[in-house]
Image: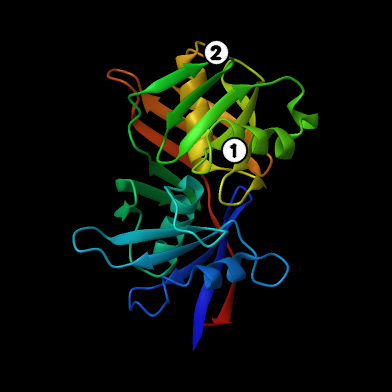
Amino acid sequence: MQITFFKYQGTGNDFVMIDNRSLIFPKENTELVASICDRKFGVGADGLILLENDTELDFKMVYYNSDGNPSTMCGNGGRCLVAYAKFLGLIEDTCYFNAVDGKHSASIENGIVSLQMMDVTEIIEKPNSYFLDTGSPHHVQLVKNLKDFDVQKEGAKLRYGVYGQSGSNINFVEQQTATTFSVRTYERGVEGETLSCGTGVTAVAIAMHNAGKTQQNQIEIETEGGSLSVHFDTTNGYTEVHLVGPAEQVFKGEIEC
């Protein structure tokens, strides 16, 4: 059986998108998902996302890491899915959708997607780092000379050594200005560095504000794949959290399933 897919990317975080409203994709075949995401023998992607019908909202997001396993929320993937839904004609400029971490709202204008993320009420302070959940678990750590930092080695060490098999995403951060931070992220499930991570960017912005590194509630984040912004309300924890940035269609293709 041939299935049509679209490739999308958001600041270099890339995804295979499949319209699965007719439930044609073999969702339990994790080996197939991994083979599609393989950059040598497949399409190549950081993850695969199925767009499905939802009984109450505009659509549902089903996300798989590139290792083939279903995973927690993906911020850039969610933004790309909103762009895909608009391309399919399912939405106009705003939408509501369900994901593994619950209901999300989003808007899209001129290729820029603003995605509302989950509220954050707990931030765990560790020696030289912070841990919080923004839909996915994230370790946030300030470092010097981020450009030359060994993200693969140090990220894997923390991902497994501190957080065990279930793991955490690991973000290494360097402050640039009062409102701008650079970040490089080691993603579990990819088991390596990605050019950008939406839930990671969100975690960095909130952690840096909580740590007093910035007083602003709109923060610019520079990733290896481009720029994203995060804004939030701090009246009662971190609420009205929005991740904002570009989402682009790269190409269309067909795969055998």
Nearer to us of marks 2 and 1 is 1
Few, some or many C-alpha atoms within 10 Å of disc 1 (few <14, some 14-19, many ≥20)? Answer: some
Few, some or many C-alpha atoms within 10 Å of disc 2 (few <14, some 14-19, many ≥20)? Answer: some
Where disc 1 sits, the SS reads helix
Q: Which residue is mark 2?
A: 213
Whole-Å distance between the Cαs marked 2 and 1?
28 Å
**Residue at x-position 54% and y-position 70%:** 31
Furthest residue to the left? 56
Q: Is residue 223 above or below residue 17?
A: above
Do the CB atoms of the residues marked 2 and 1 lie less than 8 Å apart? no
Amino acid under disc 1: Tyr
Q: Is residue 223 visible?
A: no
Left or right of residue 153, residue 126 in this image: left
Which of the pair 196/58 is nearer the observer? 196
**Residue 223 spot, x, y in % from top left:** 64, 37
Q: Is residue 116 above or below residue 220?
A: below
Residue 151 placement: quadrant: top right
Left or right of residue 158, residue 122 in this image: left
Q: Is residue 119 above or below residue 14?
A: above
Furthest residue to the bottom? 1
Amino acid under disc 2: Lys
**Residue at x-position 33% and y-position 46%:** 101
Q: How is the image coloured?
A: rainbow
Q: How many marks?
A: 2
Residue 232 placement: quadrant: top left
Where disc 2 sits, the SS reads loop
**Residue 157 spot, x, y in % from top left:** 66, 34
**Residue 70 spot, x, y in % from top left:** 44, 58
User: Label for residue 160?
Assistant: 1
**Residue at x-position 67% and y-position 46%:** 192
Which of the pair 231/39 is nearer the observer? 39
Which of the pair 75/114 is nearer the observer? 75
